[in-house]
Image (tube, rainbow, N blue to C red):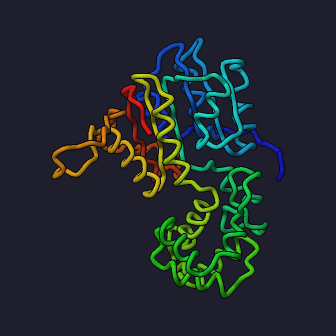
Amino acid sequence: MSTHITHTTHSPALLSEVVELLSLNAGDRCVDATLGDGGHAAALLEATAPDGMLLGIDADPQALERAALRLEPLGDRVTLVNDNFSNLETVLEAHRFRPVSSVVMDLGLSSWQLESAERGFSFRDVTPLDMRLGPTQAVTASDIVNTSSEVDLTQILFEFGEEPRARRIAQGIVRRRPIDTAQQLASVVEAIIPRRGRRVHPATRTFMAIRIAVNWELENLESALHQAVRVLEHGGRLAVIAYHSLEDRIVKRFMGRESRNCVCPPQQIECACGHRATVKVLTRKVVRPSDEEVQGNPRIRSARLRACEALGVSVN
């Protein structure tokens, strides 16, 4: 994988809304659990100046290099770690960086990741299917596409892509194997779902589903949410930006569940579960980008922001 980096920056999604919801103060310790280009991280450091500290985590070493360039002027206020946010607690323990005042998670991919010809995320790519966020991950998109059974492929496309034509696409993939490039995979889907002037490429759901499966994105998100609440100090805040309904549903249900004192059925008179609320939800309605922001960056049109405040109660 090439390590050449072009240092271009963009404004991250819902930046002002994230900063406002996190209610930052000078000297706070913050975590950007999905660092990306470092846009949210830079804003958090500005809001906690002059002595606030930030630990940034990203599974993609290229993202870490790009963020390091952006955050270099802030010197020792910044610690960057190449890891997955599913290991949040382990990373913070290793760097003696807890408890923290805030955690932010932006679950989207950066434009440069989507457009990188080496990753296989783009429908136009003629390089091998990869889709891994970290180069050390064992399973690639090619492995899933070329070795999964038709039944397993159907399940992946339906559950992770919410693709109504999952079975037909899975059948088409199995018939056309081996499929070596993203472009070939896209052509298989287009043969089943003709484009016919569609604004969104017909292979979008298929690519999303396979990427989610490759990177264990939903399982990792669920784990990271629980860990985020555990590492926050009392009154600390968590902000999460999701970009599709599967992610947003997990975040919404987690915050809803953890904001209630009991999750037992209402008809159960004597509750023995012992569950206590661990967070207070700060966004009763999901926060979306303004029309003006979407015009400036169309990729964030599906962004959905939710936030909560930790109550200092242990969460399993």
In the shown orientation, is residue 205 left or right of residue 188?
left
- Residue 249 lies left or right of residue 264; in this view the side is right
- Residue 76, picture quadrant: top right
In the displayed image of the protein, which residue is found farthest to the bottom? 175
**Quadrant location, the C terminus:** top left
Between 74 and 295, the one nearer to me in the picture: 74
| Above or below, comparing residue 56 to residue 3 in the picture | above
Q: How many marks?
A: 0
Q: In this view, does 181 lie to the left or right of 28?
A: right
Q: Position of residue 287 (x, y in %)?
A: 37, 42
Q: Residue at x 67, y 70 (%)?
A: 144
Query: Image point 39% across, 23% down: which residue?
Result: 235
Image location of residue 75, percent across then percent down: 72, 19
* Residue situated in front as seen by the camera: 119 or 7: 119
Between 137 and 60, the one lying in front of the other is 137
Q: Residue 251: where, in percent of width, then height?
A: 42, 47
Q: In this view, does 62 lie above or below 40?
A: below
Q: What residue is drawn where x is 70% and y is 76%?
A: 147
| Rendered residue at 68%/20% (across/down) | 74
Q: Where 314 falls versus 53 (above or below)?
A: below
Q: In this view, does 48 lie above or below 81?
A: above
